[in-house]
Every structure is written in C-alpha cells, then in structure tokens.
Amino acid sequence: MQFDPFVIPFNLGLYFIILYCVGTCILWFRDLSRTDKLRLQRGFFGRPFVWSLREIFMESLIHRKIFKVNPVLGYMHMSLAFGWFLLIVLGTIEADVFGDSHLNPPSKAIFFRFFNPEHGAEGFARGYSFIMDIILAFILSGLMIAIIKRFWSRIVGMKKTTRLKTLDKIALASLWIIFPSRLLAESFTCGAAGSGSFLTGTLGSFFADFLPSSQMAYPFWWLYSLSVGVFFILLPRTRYMHIPSELFLIFLRNSGVRTGDKYGSFAEAQVYSCSSCGICIDKCQLNSSAGINNVQSAYFIKGLKRNDDVYDISLNCLMCGRCETACPVGIELGALRMIQRRAGEAPEDMKTIWTGYMRERNQKIRNGLNNYTKVFKYLKPEIIDTSPEVLYFAGCMTHLSPGIASSMEKIFEAVGVNYLFMDQEGSVCCGRPLMLAGKDREARELIQHNTSTIWSSGAKILVTSCPICLKVFTESYHLDLEVLHHSQYIKTLIDEGRLDLKFLNQTVVYHDPCELGRGLGIYDEPREVLYHIARCQKTAYERENAPCCGGSLGNMQLDSRKKTLIASDALYDLTSSSSDYLITSCPLCRKTLRKAEQNDTPEILDVAELVVKAISDSARAEKLYHEEPSEEVINVETQ
Amino acid sequence: MKKFGFSSIKPRVIDYDRNNRAVMEYIMENEPSFALCIGCGGCAATCSAAQFTDMSLRKLNILIKRGENDEVRRLMNKCMLCGKCTLVCPRGVNTRNVIFLTQQAFRKLDNYAV
Amino acid sequence: MPEQYDRHIIIVGAGAAGCTAAGQLAREGYRISLIEKENEPGGKVINWYQLFPDRRKSEEVLKYLRDEIDNPLINISLNTTVESIVKEDDRFIVTTTRGVLTAADAILMATGFDLFKPERKEEYGYGIYDDVITSVELEEKFHSGTVLTSKGVAPERVGIVHCVGSRDEKVGNFHCSKVCCVTAVKQAIEIREMLPGTEVFCFYMDMRMFGPYYEELYREAQEKWGVNFIRGKVSEASENIEGRLLVKVEDTLAGKPLKMQVDLLVLMIGMENSLSGKKIAGSLDLEIGINGFFSVLDNHYGNNQSNQAGVFFAGTCTAAMNITDTISHARASVVEIGRYLKSKEKRVVL
Amino acid sequence: MKLEGKKRIWKEFQKEIPDDHFFFVRSCIRQSFFPGSEQFLIKLLREELGKDIYEDPRHTTCTGIGYHSDVVPFETIQTVVARHFALATERGYKDILISCVTSFGIYEEIVETWKHFPETLEKTREYLYKATKREFEVPRTILHTSDAVYKFKDEIAARMKYPLVDHKTGEPLKAVEHIGCHYSKMFPKYGVGGAEFPHTLVGMIESWGGKVIDYPERRHCCGFGFRQYLIQADRGYSMSNSKKKFESMEPYKPEFVLANCPGCTMFMDKWQYTLKEQEGKTYGVNGQGIPVLTYEELAGLVMGYDPWELGVQYHMVQSEPLMDKMGIPYDKDKKYIAKDGSKLIAPKNLINA
C-alpha cells in the first residue's frame, strides 16, 4: 500500500505554496520596469544565475552573514534551513533508491519511513538511515536554540527579538511541531518494526518496551503531515514568506536590479524577504542609547507588510545606515524609508492598501514635479565671475563650527591655491536636509540654484566640509567639476607634495561620519591624512561599525535630550582608549559630540583643524622671512 | 454701491477667540518641545533662509500659537529645513520638526494635496 | 554680667525681617522690643499659601519666624503703631499708640512693604469688573481650596498680568518688584494643577527669573503645565456682554495687537515702601531713595545702615526682596547693630 | 460690574465747575453741522437757568485742526488762544466755556505748557501784544460745554418732560456715551470722572433716567484723527475705528449714542451712512441706525423742546425711532421748514427716515 489519507494535508500545503510562489513571481516580474525585465532575462541566462545559486547556498541555506554577526544565531538558521534542505534531498534519494518505484511524489519521500517501516535494518540502508537520523538530530538541535531564543533571547546574545502577531505564532508553533512529531512518528514506527538508527531506533525500542508503538505511530504521522501542511498554507501571510521571497530577491539583485526612488516589485520583494530576525534592532542606536524600540527597520517593514501607516516610523530614524550594513538579507532599508518619506502620510481611507497607495503617491509626486509652484522664489541667481581653481562650500553646519572653515582657509593659503569661499556670507542649503524630509521637489529648487552658481564659477574642484552636502553634490547634482570632501582634497594636496606637514607626536581616534562613511564609502582618505600627522588608534567602532553621533538630520522627531544620550554613548565607545584627540570630518558630528563632552574626553576636532596644527613651521617661517627680515640678521649687520 | 475713494480696513488685531488654533494643537501634540520657546530669536538669527527673505522662525512660532494661519502659510515654506536653528535653540526645541509638522498640518487641512 | 545685657533695641515690624533679626539679636543677649501694627507676627508671609520656587507651605516659614521670636529677651507688642521716634544724643525715644518706650540704644526699621493699590491702574478695572483680582486674593482662593469666578464657576481661561504697579512711570514706580514674575509662574502652575481644564496666560514685559530654581520653574510651567506666555503689557481690560473680561495687549513677539477673553484676570501687584514706615522716617528724617524705599548708606557694603547713626534697616523697607534675601538681610543687620553698639561702649570707656 | 468702584474713581476726578458767568467760544464744526446745539446751549443757560453766558463776536477759530494737521505752528496757536483769553479778560470773565473738545484740548495743552514752561507764556504775551496790543490773564477754569450741562444736569432733570425711558414699558433706554479723546485722555484731571471711566455724559444720561452700557470698545477713539480724515484715501482708517466701536456696541442694542465732541458726533453719525452704503450694514435694532446726539440736543429733547428747533434732523441717522420710544411728539411736515417759513431741500439717503 503506497497511499494513506494522512498525507493529504501535507500535499495540499505543498501544492498550494508552490502555486502561490510561482504566481507571486509572475506578478512581481510583470510589475518590473522594462529595463529591469531585460536585466533579469539577461541575468537568468548568464553568470548572475550561477552567482545567485552560490549566494542562495551561502546565505539562504548556510546563512553565512548571520554566522558572522552571531554564530549561535547562524547555527540555528543553518541547522533549520540547511538541515531541512538535506532531509528533503536525501529523503527523495532514499525513496528513489530503496522505494519499490522511482520518481515518487514528494509525500513518499517525506513519509518514507511510514511506507517502509522495516527499511534500513541492515547493510547500506542501515548506514543511510543513520545519516538521516544525524540530519534530524542536527535540525532538532537548531530547533532547541530557536525555542530558547524565543523565550530567553539574551542567551543567544540578542538584546531584542521581534514581537509576533498571532498568525506568526501559529506558523511558528507548527514549524516547531514538524520535526519533533517526525521524530516521534518515525521512532514509534521503527519501534514497532525494530528498525531505525541511533536516534529513531533507540527511541523507538525504548518506547516499544512500555507503549503500544504500532498504535501510537499513526496519530504522530498525522500530526507531522498536518504541521507541515499548516506551515505551508500559513507561509504567505507570515514572516516565513521570507524563505521563498529571498530566492527571487537574490536573482533580481544579482541581475543588477536596485530599489531606486519609487515603490515597485523589487521593493516589495525586499519587504517580503525580511525575516524579522531583529539584527537591525540590535544595531540601532535609537534602541541601544535612546530606548526607542518600535521604529527599527524590522518594525518598519512589518508595518509595510501589514499595510499600517508607517509614516511616523519612517521619520523617526537617524538614516545612519548601520542596520543596512548589518542586514543579513541585504535589504536596502534606507531606500525603503526614503520612499515612505517621499510618499508622506497615508490618509485614513488609504492606510489599508499601502502598496497601491505608494504607487499612486509616487505617480502623483512625479506629476507634481511638473505642476508645482516654486517655494524658494526669493532666491535670486548668483554669478561668480572670478574663476577660481577651487570653490569652497562650507555648508550650513560648518557655519556653526567656524573653526573648520577658518582651518580650510588657512590650508588654502598655506598651499597658495586660488580659491573662493562660495558661502562665506552664509549658505543656500544644499538640499539634502529637504530630501531627508522627503521633500524632493523643494530640494530640487535649491539644487538647481546652487548648480547654476557653481557652474558660473568655472572652478575645477568643489571642496566641501560637510558630508551631508557632499552626498547630495555627488549623487543629485549635475556638475562639471570634481567634488571632494575637504579630507579628500587635503589628501591630494599631501600626495602632490603641496602641503608640507610635520608629524604631531600625538595619538588620535577617528570617527567615521555616517554620510561620509556608510553613506559614500569614504573611509580611507581621512585616515591617510591622519597617518601623516599623528598616531591613529584603532577602536572596535570603525568604518561600517562606526556609531552615529545622534545629531543626524535624518531624524525629524528625535528630541535634543535623546540626541545627547546617543552622542554620549558614542563618545564613550570612541574614547574608551585614551587618546589626545577625537577626530571627525563632519561639522555636525563635531558639534553633536562636543555637546556630550565630559571633562575627561579628549578634544574633539575636525581633521582640517588638526591638519592646520601640523602645517610645518618651515612653511610659516618662509612666509615670515619674505614679509620682514628677522632680528638676528640686523644684529649681524651691526657687528 | 457708491464709490467713496476709501473703504474700511481689516483689523490687524489677533482675535485669539476667533482664530483657528488646530495647527497649534497638532504641533503641541506631536512636538511637545514647541511649548518651550522663549522667543529669544536665536533661530531667526542663524536661519539660512532669513538672509534672503523675511523668514523668522521666532515669529512663526508665535503666529502658529496665536492661530494667525494666513501668515503662517506665507512663511512656513520659505524654510530650507537645514536644521541650523535646532542646533542653536537654547531651550532644545526641535524647531526643524516644528516647521515640518506645520507644513504637514496644513497639508492635512488641504486634505493631502501633494 | 556683660555690658550688652542692658542694651535695648527696638525693632519696628515683626515680619520676616523683624522676627529674624529679633531672634538673632536676642541670642546675642540684647533686650528687644518688637513692635507690630497687626495682631500677629509674620507680616506679608501670612498672605501666602505656597512659596516659590519649591512650593513649600508658607506655614513652615511662619513657624520658623515665630520660633525665632520665642525668647524671654524679646518683648513683642502687637496691634501697636509707632507714631514717632526722636533721637536724643545716643538714645532713641519711641512713641507708640501704647505710650512711650524709652531708652533704645538702636532702632531696626523692619517696616517692610505695602502692596501696590491696583485701583491706581484704572484701565485694568480692579474693583469695577467682578473678575479682576490681585495675586494676594488668588492666594486666598488657593487657601480656600478652589479657584472660582464671581459667577461661582471654574474659569475656562485665566489671564495673569505682570508688573502691575512696577516698572511703570505712570504710577510713579520705576523699580522692579522682582518677585512678581516668579509668583506669577508659581500661581499659574497652581491653577493648572487645581483646574487642569483651565488655560492660563501670563502677560509679561520681561521674565525676570533672578533666583535659584526660578528659571527651572519657568521651564516646568511651559513643559509640564502648558502655561502660555505672551510678551506684552496689558493695555486695558473691559467686560463684554457675557460679562467675560476682554483683555487688550500687544503680542510684541508677533508684532501685532491681540485681544482675548478671560474669565479671571489676576494682577501681579508690586511692592512699595510702607506708608507707616515712611511716617516714622519723617520723624527720624531718614532719606528716601528714588525708588521710594529707604535709601541705605552704601549700596554694596552698607545696605543695613541709614543716614542716622543707630538706625538700621532690615528687609523690604530698603528694596523689593524675596523671603530668602529678606532673612539674609535681617541677619546681616544683626552684625551691623552689634558693631555699632560695641563702638559706643568703647567711647564710654575712653 | 461694581458701580461703587466707578463712583470711587469719579470722586477722585472732581472738577471745579463755576455756576455762573461763562465766556463762550464756539466750535467750527458744531456751528456748521449741528447749529441747533450751540443755539440751544445759550438758550438753556440764559433763559432756562438764567445764567450769564457771554459770547464775543470777535472770537475766532482756535485753529486746532490746522495745528493737529501740522499747518499751524504751536507759537501761532498759543497767540490765537491768548487773544481769546484777552477778549475774556477785557470783559472780566475768568471762566472759559469751550464748545469744541478739540479746542478744549488745545486750551488745556497751552495752559499746561505755560505752567511748566513760563518762558513760553512770556513769549506769547509778547507776540500777542506786538500783534494786537492786547494783554490777558490766564483763565481760572477751562470748561467744556458738556461740563456746564453736567453741572446743571439736575436742574434739567427737574424741568424734564420726556425722561429717557420707553414711555410704553417704562424701561430705561440703553445709551452709549462717547467722550472725545481730547476731553480727558490728555489731561484726566480736567475731565469729570477722569479718562478711564469719565462721568460727564454718564451723569447726564443717568440723571435723565437712561441706562449707560459699558461695552468693550467704549474707550476707543471714533477715528476722527485729524490727519486721517483730511486725505480722502486715508478715510478708511478713520471709518474703521468707528466700525470697530459699532461692532462692539451692537450686541447691547443701544437706543442712541451721546457724544460730547463735535468730531465724534459728526463721524459716528456720518460713518454709519458710509458703512451702510459700502457694506450694507447698520448697527441698530431691526436694520436701523443708532442716532448720535449732542448733549444739548438730548437735554432739549428731554425738556420737551421741538426736535426740529434743536436740529436733530440735521444728522445722517434720524432720531424718529428714539423719539417714538420716548413718546416725544413731532410734526413730520415741519421737519424741513426754515425759520422764515421757506421750505428747505430734504436730504436723501438718510438712515431711520
């Protein structure tokens, strides 16, 4: 006999989920822009396909990234994903090799033991069922951790774990039941048949001594089939949808599809690929320093899935990008938030159809760009006719820490470059802050204004002291000149040997500003400048892992007290090792961190300010000599 | 109607009891630090926009509180949201969010016009 | 038996200053006659319900003052008014409504202050419109436990007018009474606490939060209690047809005139030198400063001495002060009196 | 509202008003717009009360409006006023009775200036002497005609035929009193009852049986404001002030406005017409306007004089509804008959007509 009614739930679940996934993939594909479709097609028949397979293996089965962040968590995911994968593959093979027929339906592979109770008594089959038992044990070990994590998340080294909704709970329960029920079902069957290996066999014979194994087995097979079936059927409505979605996402990503600035199926695929693992929550300083724990990316995306109005959540974020770098699925969290910010708040009646609403809003906004009345009419075009070599744009924030601007001027003078201080009289904002508030159209006005001013100058290099400005200059301005952060510019000066610096016998710690580091990937230039003038100290909080100062313009809602909390924590981390200076390269970071200064914190300076300290006296002396003859010379004359 | 060459003038007085202060309530609710303003004018002094136009956040704050909405509408969009004001405010008012919320509040009033 | 035991000092006024000084001088062993025109010691502190900035009950301070003067060397005569003080070489002859007290070696003027008479600011309609009251009357309402309008209902909106009779050339007072600002803030908080549904508006010219924890209280009023502050001096109050008060003020920060209806208008009346004090000053020909208070010998290191050797000042008869400063000032006067009497002894010996 | 409170203030601002021998000077505006009023004042004082009131035909305008419009310098107006004093001195009068509140203010201002800067008095004596060979004494009291009427309000009440009550119901009539700014806002001590709660008109209304309403904008200026009304384009400012007052008094349903300043009477009367034409709005009960009367007109009415002789018909807002309420009889046909019996042209677009 090769059929039994208990396999029905399993089969239903299995075929349902297969159909559902295929359907979704088709919908998503249809929704892609034409170029993205082409990308995907090219990708499917090209190298990206191979990469994707590799990535799927490494990430979706082995979960390498999670391993990196947290081994225990990694093992948990691997044991469940990879273990189950093996169980299915080997199960199918087993059924194929030892079964009486070939090409069996999946149910036969899954419930192989039920249909062949005596199998694996001796010989090769014995060894094979031994392997199957190992895999089962492997999975169960992972399951154990999962259960522990759910109830005592700290044990597995996680401060926070995501909160669940009821469907998730049911799905989770069924997932938890699957493997224990399989274990018991198999054990009883083996017990009755005297077959099975070290796990199922021993457990089986143990039960057999005092339980009517043959009768006991059957209900557990039902339970096993049911739990799997339920799990599959619930899958689409729960976070476990991330398992199939991620596969699709990986293909899209490897084929070169990106989020962009509007909501589409790639964004949707990302949303559904979020497993709510909660790593982002741990990474978020709003959580760790300011005690805000309902706005992190995991909750934001969960909100998106549930069609909640997540506008407020989207605004309460530093946009520091720490979660994005940590996300094991590689979801572009920043981009998703920006989409929501641009879309704005959903009116009551639209909250329940978020995806549709987002598409509509994006359309409206794009139309709005055309029939939009200017708000910055008061800005009159500025013309710079003295064509300087370097155009220096300090930026609004730099005007509040003038030490940086004046240092830059000293540097320009020291190298005798022909420069122009573009916003000496005060800046027209670069537009980035408006963008961060989701006001692209308004930002566009400022961008146009500044662009025309910059073009009119005919300068070759645009140097800015503010990473916020730099980001928008490089990403959203169309300029015909080289745009550099002052740290980059200083580096080129040093490389060209135009700036003669002496080594200050001091140790410094460098803090990577979010916009400059994670935002633009500029990690090395500031450091290389520092190597020339001081001893740089390494900390555990560098580069991608650098903390945010808390002052970010990305967050609309954070109040000043909480900003300071974040700043002082960041300061504590950065200054744990004793150093003479804490160096950063962002006026806003500098100001925010200074707000949290204790009397034992080292002086906080911008890289430019330290460079000025290091401009060698010979250079200065030379200047002096040319200006006025020194005392001694005269004395020599008289003698 | 006869032509007299003159007509009566709308009073400049803030009629507190007639004015609609819904916007103020909305902001108070979403940005409580709004209440802390002492009208020192630090924000207005540092304001990037104020160099080019008559934007004054200090004034805007008061006008919002008094429900002088016409003038608030006129001023609020002149802000570049650059955030300097927030850094100088001695009372730690989240001024940037105040303006942002004001614009939002009026968008609500105008029923979510993009 | 040391000289000083038969040294006799007459202190005029048993308020915060009088009581403090009396207690301290008695502890030093001087004989004190404490003269008070009211029927109990404590002065203006009695009017108050809670005190800024910590809003402790005024009774506690009153108790302190009463304990201070609980001393056999202090002879306190209540319901007594000083009619004149005459100086005969180093002695002072004090005539009161109870007859003549002779042979005082020194006089301490602790005559305190009078509250500004709000009727003098006619435009606010005190005594004409039913719901215009003074800060002191509001304290009485706090004592009674409820703040109601003349119609016997809780006010929907209360206006508090700062600087009534202070910094106002029109009533001949140039000085700042110092304590009104923080009193206004304190009372605003108390109203909000008692009647959470009531809006409170303070109309101020400047917020002069000069003392410790005053600014913090101001911040608390804004942050925790949602008290509203409008910068501008109320120009006039009038009653509308529902009998609500219509207040006119310029919102100087908005640069526009503003009118609003309130159900209760509280006038923060300022301090003036007490009339009774001035009368005595006449007989002693003490100098009066431009602020109407007694002028002290030196504004920095002689603010307890008068232009009359042997006559000393303590507390608000020299300037507007809060209780803390009054008590310190009174304690300082003790040192000055002591030094003065010692110098006299020396002269006797030589 | 506590009346005793007001009484207290009124006590503080008591004004010495002599009860005989007045040197009368006219008001430019009043004698042209409400000729009946000054006419009746003289009649009232001379015939009704048998007082000595002297009017010198040689007296002129005080040039006050010119002064307030910056076309007449202070020295000049001092000399003009000094001339009036001289005329009074020559006739041996010590108390000047001024019909116009603007002049009243000017006279006060000048006398106060002389008090504080005696050299200006000397200069003025010099100027006047050079110009006219006249010399003068500074008068003992400076009176406004409303002060005089206030002084004799009880005598008038004694002669009263039609008290200020609804003759049907006996209800006292609700009245708005409006004091000219220059009557007591400049020098409260010269106004009966001071500046905040003046008693001059209140006293008349109350002793003649009426009820004064205290509305929020009671203190507000009528908007006359010399400069404003002189330039046509600026009259909007002027009118807006009156409008503000009307809007504020409207809910109290006043029967009439009593003013003691020629400008106020004229503008609060005429602006009602303009506002009706421009904004189609009137502020009295059931679409009517609010009659604005001078205190002499009111005195005359209560004493039962013929309204047409008092000249109440020479207002934009007609007083018939008021007179009906008070039960005063009047003959419609005689309304525009001149003294010589000739028929005058009846003005158009009157309110309440």
Image: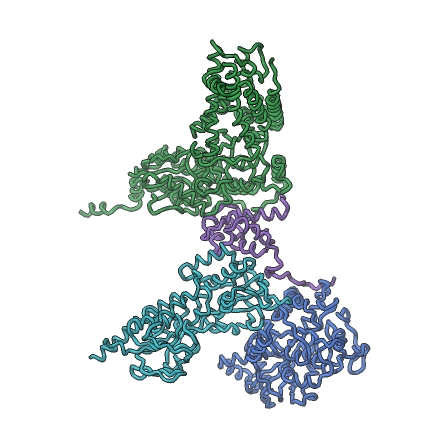
Chain colours: A green, B purple, C cyan, D blue
Residue A239 at x, y = what percent? 55, 31
Which residue of the protein is positioned furthest toward the front in this rendering? A210
Task: Give whichever of D349, A506 is nearer the camera.
Answer: A506
Residue D137 at x, y = what percent? 55, 87
Residue C162 at x, y = what percent? 49, 65
Residue A526 picture quarter:
top left
Residue A250 against residue C210 in the figure, above or below: above
Query: In the shown orientation, is residue D341 left or right of residue A414?
Result: right
Residue D202 picture quarter:
bottom right
Residue A366 at x, y = what percent? 61, 37
Residue A68 picture quarter:
top left
Residue B40 against residue D54 in the figure, above or below: above
Give the quarter of the figure containing the C terminus of chain D.
Answer: bottom right
Task: Give whichever of A281, A448 is nearer the camera.
Answer: A281
Residue A198 against residue C78 in the figure, above or below: above
Task: Give whichever of C174, B12 is nearer the camera.
Answer: C174
Query: In the shown orientation, is residue A146 left or right of residue A599?
Result: right
Task: Give whichever of A50, C348 is nearer the camera.
Answer: C348
Counting labels gives: 0
Query: In the shown orientation, is residue C314 left or right of residue A8?
Result: left
Give the quarter of the figure containing the N terminus of chain D.
Answer: bottom right
Residue D201 against residue A305 in the figure, above or below: below
